[in-house]
Image (spheres, helix red, strand yellow):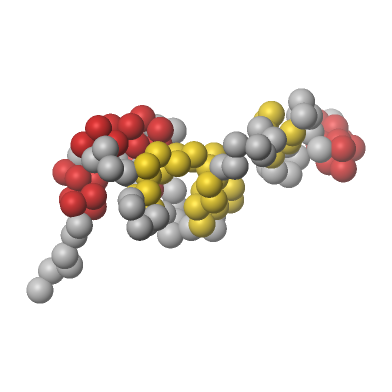
Amino acid sequence: MGVKMNKYERWIIDQDITYEKAYGNCQELCLEMLEAFPMLSLVRGHYYCAIWGERGHWWLTDEDNNIIDPSAIQFPSKGKGVYVPWNEGDKEPTGKCPNCGRYCYDGEHVHEECYDSFVASLYE
């Protein structure tokens, strides 16, 4: 006997969403799915992939707060990671540190503790 799919999983499969279609298009795919299922809620936040780490991301939730992610295929962990909603009062990142890869804030482009290592790497 096959695995029973819910209507959201079926919609995602029917859209034939490939890695190429999903990568970087999470908000657009969520908005498309929201047209088909207006009872869902759009969520902005971060997805923590075990392989890629923290990524800005968009997904949907149903009335029971279950996560529905039409672009999960873009991640090596395929949506098995951790979804953390954005709190509108939180600071916005201004970029990622080229030395350690963590987000930078308040106009910073390299973390203070990473600066010397980063500059040294430019002259190697």
Q: Picture quarter containing residue 5?
A: bottom left
Q: Residue at the spot x=74%, y=33% of the render? A: 105
37 with respect to 110 (left or right): left
Q: Determine whether 56 is above or below 50 in the image.
A: above
Please identify the quarter of the rendering in which residue 34 is found: top left
In the rendered view of the protein, which quadrant contains the C terminus? top right
Direction left: furthest residue: 1
54 left or right of 114?
left
Residue beneath the point at 73% across and 44% down:
100
Where's residue 73, x and y in %? 36, 47
Does 48 sit above or below residue 18? below
Nearest to the observer: residue 58 or residue 111: 58
> Where is residue 81 drawn, in percent x and y?
48, 58
Q: Quadrant location of the N terminus?
A: bottom left
Residue occupying the point 85% across, 32% down: 119
Does any portion of residue 96 appear in the rendered image?
A: no
Q: Position of residue 111 (x, y in %)?
A: 81, 38
Which residue is at 23% across, 50% downward?
8
The spot of residue 65 in percent (x, y) is 39, 55
Looking at the image, residue 43 sits to the left or right of residue 63; the answer is: right
How many numbered circles does the render carry? 0
Q: Nearer the viewer, residue 86 or 52?
A: 86
